[in-house]
Amino acid sequence: LHVACRCGASFEVVAALLKAWPDGVKEKTESSFEHIFEERQWVPYWDTPLQMACSCRASFEITSLVLNTWLSFKENRTKSAIMTLQRVTADCTGDVKDLISHLFALCNNNADNPSPNEIMDYFVHIEMWSGATLVLDTNPTAIKTMGLDTKVMADLLSTVGRCCSLKAMWEVLCNEQDLLEGV
């Protein structure tokens, strides 16, 4: 997966590798050396396939596929994990920078950031479902303003239950009490 992201493999190859071993997205490999000026030495740093895809300017389709898989793992849905991507965003293509900036916006309470609803709309538009559930995990009240038909709420609740925290599920249910009417 690292080699595929680094060498510009096709979308189909990356998708097949992720399908065969989704956990590969978490693996780190020594990719290069970074100079530490204070100590005057070279030290290795480690890249995940996602960091490598960003650094090597992989296409938006490949980077978003790898990112969607990366976000499906609970340990990567934290602010600290997401902020590790800052080191490689300078090398990304413009559309990938935009994608990752939406993730950073979830981690920062900056007035200039898009709202959780705008971030949710963006992830839904590009069909990045791990990103959409991350928005719900960090901002469960976003469901209330989405204007979803009650008929699709069962599927949404099922997804929230599988992908989000118990706290997020509780807040969704508290904000959508009409769903429990007659139960």
Image (spheres, rainbow, N blue to C red):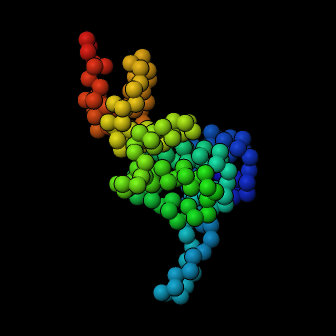
Q: Position of residue 73 (x, y in %)?
A: 47, 45
Q: Position of residue 166 (x, y in %)?
A: 31, 36
The residue that appears at 55% across and 52% down in the rendered structure is: 98
* On screen, residue 43 above or below 116: below
The residue that appears at 50% across and 54% down in the rendered structure is: 101
Q: Is residue 129 visible?
A: no
Q: Nearer the viewer, residue 95 or 2?
A: 95
Q: Nearer the viewer, residue 169 or 162?
A: 169
Q: Position of residue 65 (x, y in %)?
A: 60, 44
Q: Position of residue 143 (x, y in %)?
A: 37, 32
Q: Is residue 112 visible?
A: yes
Would you identify the image quadrant in which residue 13 lies?
Answer: top right
Give the residue furthest to the top: 182
* On screen, residue 51 above or below 44: above
* On screen, residue 155 above or below 84: above
Quadrant location of the C terminus? Answer: top left
Q: Would residue 160 appear left or right of 37 to someone viewing this image?
A: left
Q: Nearer the viewer, residue 183 or 122?
A: 122
